[in-house]
Amino acid sequence: EGFSKVPNCSTEGRSLMSMDLATLFHGLIPETVHAEVVDDYPSISPPPNACREEMMRYVDTFVKVFYFPNQDIIDWITVNWGEYHLDHSLSLITSKSAGSKDKRFMLHG
């Protein structure tokens, strides 16, 4: 959700998002999370690993789509419209068009 709310982002910024995501992914290893909270919350179960992997795929793909050429972004949204929240898909277009010098993309998508 957070990455989709960035109104304008450079290529370098998107690269940093990918690095942040990788760090988060490694920090959410179920055993690590459980070890950190078990003293304060002894009855809590570690998060399922499948949830972590699904989250990583979802966000990683979203960040990588930003690098696609303009028409490929539209095509990707069309193919994946049911997998991603509408606001997330729209943010790809608005973020990309905000930094685009291609006036046709901004006018016609």
Image: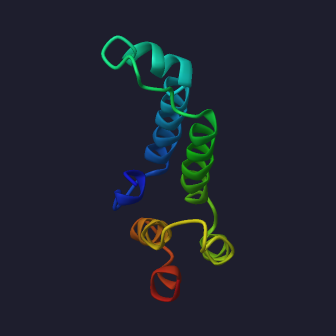
In the picture provided, is 73 more to the left or to the right than 39?
right
Q: Position of residue 38 (x, y in %)?
A: 40, 15
User: Which of the 4 image quarters holds residue 70?
Assistant: bottom right
For residue 39, above or below residue 78: above
The residue under the point 49% across, 24% down is: 27
Q: How many marks?
A: 0
Q: Position of residue 82 (x, y in %)?
A: 60, 73
Q: Of residues 34 and 92, which is closer to you in this image? A: 34
Name of the residue lying farthest toward the front: 43
Q: Position of residue 54 (x, y in %)?
A: 61, 46
Image quadrant occupied by the N terminus: bottom left
The residue under the point 60% across, 66% down is: 83
Q: Of residues 30 and 39, which is closer to you in this image? A: 39
The residue under the point 43% across, 45% down is: 13
For residue 27, above or below residue 83: above
In the picture provided, is 58 more to the left or to the right than 10?
right
For residue 59, above or below residue 39: below
Q: Position of residue 75 (x, y in %)?
A: 67, 76
